[in-house]
Image (tube, rainbow, N blue to C red):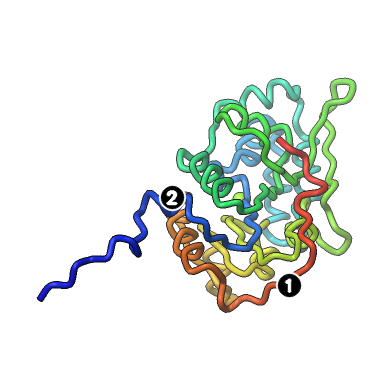
Amino acid sequence: MPIKPNYAFMTFESERSVSSKKLDCFVSIDFDGTITDSDITDAVIKKFARPEWEAVERLWEAGAIGSMECLSKQMALIDASLAEILEYAGEFSVNETFSAFVNFLRKNEMPFAIISDGFDLIIKKILSKSGLSNIPVYSNRITEIYGELMTSFPYNKTGCSSGVCKCSVARANSGGLPVIHIGDGRSDFCLAEDAAHVFSKKKLTDYCRTKNLNHTPFFDFKTIENSLAVLIERGSFESVETEKIMPSFNSGALIL
Ligand SMILES: [Mg+2]
Ligand SMILES: [Zn+2]
C-alpha cells in the first residue's frame, strides 16, 4: 500500500530561504574574480599603468615581493586621474548571481563582508552601479591628492606581505564564529587555512586540494546558496568547533 506523504513535515524549496533555522557563521567574500567575473584591479593596471608594471608583476608571481609592494608600485605607474579610473571601472559589474546571494545572506541573518586586496573606490563604483549598498568592505584604499594617486593599506599586518591580511581581518570581525570564505586566488590562501569551509575557484581550488582544506569548488553564487541552504537546514557545521564569545561584527569596515 502506498504511503501518503505527510506534507506537514516537508520543506519546499521556496520556504527554505525563510526558514527559521540559522547557521552561525561569518561569510567572507573576495571581490576580484569572485564577485566580479574578471579581476578589475588587474584590468585597471593593464589599461592605465606604464609598461614597467609587467616587471613588477613578474616579481610578485615569483614570490619575490608581496601584493602590497606589488600594488603600490604598479598603481604608482598610473598617470590617469582617479575619475578616469572610476569611469573605466564602471564598465564592469558584479556576477549576475551576486545580488540574489546578498539577499539570501540577509534573509538568513548571516553576517558577511567583502574582504578584498583591491581598492575601496573601485569596489564601491562597481557595487553601486549594480544597485548594491550597505555592504561592509575591508580593502586597500585609493585617493587623489593634488592630482596624484595615493594608495594606502590600512589592513596590512606586520609579517604578512599582502595588502589586506585577510586572515587577521576575518579573525577580528567574525565575532568568533566559524568563517566561510569564498574566493579564487592567492590573496585568499591565508584565510583559506583558517576557514571552517571554503568555496573556491581557480588557483584557490588547487591550493585547497594541495593543502587538503575543507572546500567546495563553485560555479556561481547560486551554487553556493544551494550548499548553504543544506547546511542551514542541517543547522550546524557538525565538525566545526564554535568559540562562543560575544559576537561583534565588522566594527572597522567601510560600509560601501
Ligand atoms: Mg580574487
Ligand atoms: Zn594573512
Disc 1 C-beta below 8 A from ligand 2 = no
Disc 1 and disc 2: Cα gap in Å?
29 Å
Crowding near the residue tagged with mark 2, few <14, some 14–19, many ≥20 C-alpha atoms within 10 Å: some
Q: Residue at x 61, y 62 (%)?
A: 180
Q: Nearer the viewer, mark 1 or mark 2?
A: 1
Element on which disc 2 rests: helix
Disc 1 marks which residue?
243
- At 79% across and 55% down in the image, what residue appears? 248
- Quadrant of image for the N terminus: bottom left
Counting from the top left corner in percent of width and height, residue 105 is at 56, 49
| Residue 192 position by quadrant | bottom right
Judge left or right: residue 121 versus residue 105. right
Q: From the viewer's side, name the closer residue of 55 and 9.
A: 9
Counting other residues with Cα less than 10 Å from the Cα at mark 1, is it few (<14), some (14-19), or many (20 or more)?
A: few
Percent x, y of residue 51: 69, 36
Pointer 1 and pointer 2: residues touching (CB < 8 Å)? Answer: no
Residue 179 position, x and y percent, is 65, 63
Q: Which of marks 1 and 2 is nearer the N terminus?
A: 2
Q: In this view, does 102 lie to the left or right of 76?
A: left
Q: What element carries label 1?
A: loop
Q: Is residue 114 left or right of residue 79?
A: left
Specify the amino acid type for callout 2: Lys
Say which quadrant the C terminus sits in: top right
Residue with the mark numbered 2: 222
Question: What numbered label is drawn on residue 180?
Answer: none
Where 219 falls versus 54 (above or below)? below
Q: Relative to the observer, which residue lies in front, 196 or 34?
A: 196
Looking at the picture, tell me which residue is in the foreground, 216 or 90.
216
Q: Kindly identify the amino acid type of the residue bearing the numbered disc 1.
A: Glu
Residue 40, percent from left and from top: 61, 38
Left or right of 99, for residue 157: right
Q: Residue placed farthest to the left in the image? A: 1
